Image (cartoon, rainbow, N blue to C red):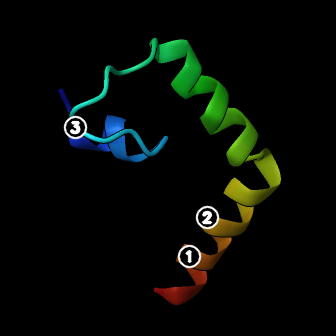
Amino acid sequence: MNIVYRWFPGYPLNEPVPHFTTIRYYFRHRFTKNIIKMVFAWILFEI
């Protein structure tokens, strides 16, 4: 299984991985549209 898929929610390698909808829930609530826009603007201004 992809290591990033485990790292993002903080699951160690010896624990079962949750269903993908759980990961999607974490992503949607951790990275709101405003935060994604801020990160995108930061990347563009750093180049």
Contact, mark 1 vs mark 3 (Cβ under 8 Å): no
Q: CA distance from mark 1 to mark 3?
A: 35 Å
Identify the residue position indicated by label 3 in the image: 13
Q: CA distance from mark 3 to mark 2?
A: 31 Å
Give 45 or 31, whichever is nearer the viewer.
Answer: 31
- The residue furthest bottom is 46
Label 2: element kind: helix
Identify the residue position indicated by label 2 in the image: 40
Q: Quadrant of residue 28?
A: top right
Q: Residues within 10 Å of mark 1 (few under 14, many from 20)?
A: few
Q: Residues within 10 Å of mark 2 (few under 14, many from 20)?
A: few
* N-term-proximal mark, 1 vs 3: 3
Spot occupied by residue 47 in the image (x, y as percentages of width and height) = 46, 86
Contact, mark 3 vs mark 2 (Cβ under 8 Å): no
Identify the residue position indicated by label 1 in the image: 44
Give 26 or 35, whichever is nearer the viewer.
Answer: 26
* Amino acid at circle 2: Phe
Identity of the residue drawn at 30% across and 28% down:
15
- 29 sits left or right of 8 in the view: right
Contact, mark 2 vs mark 1 (Cβ under 8 Å): yes
Label 1: element kind: helix
* N-term-proximal mark, 3 vs 2: 3
Spot occupied by residue 36 in the image (x, y as percentages of width and height) = 68, 55
- 11 sits left or right of 35 in the view: left
Q: Quadrant of residue 1?
A: top left
Q: Residues within 10 Å of mark 3 (few under 14, many from 20)?
A: few
* Amino acid at circle 1: Leu
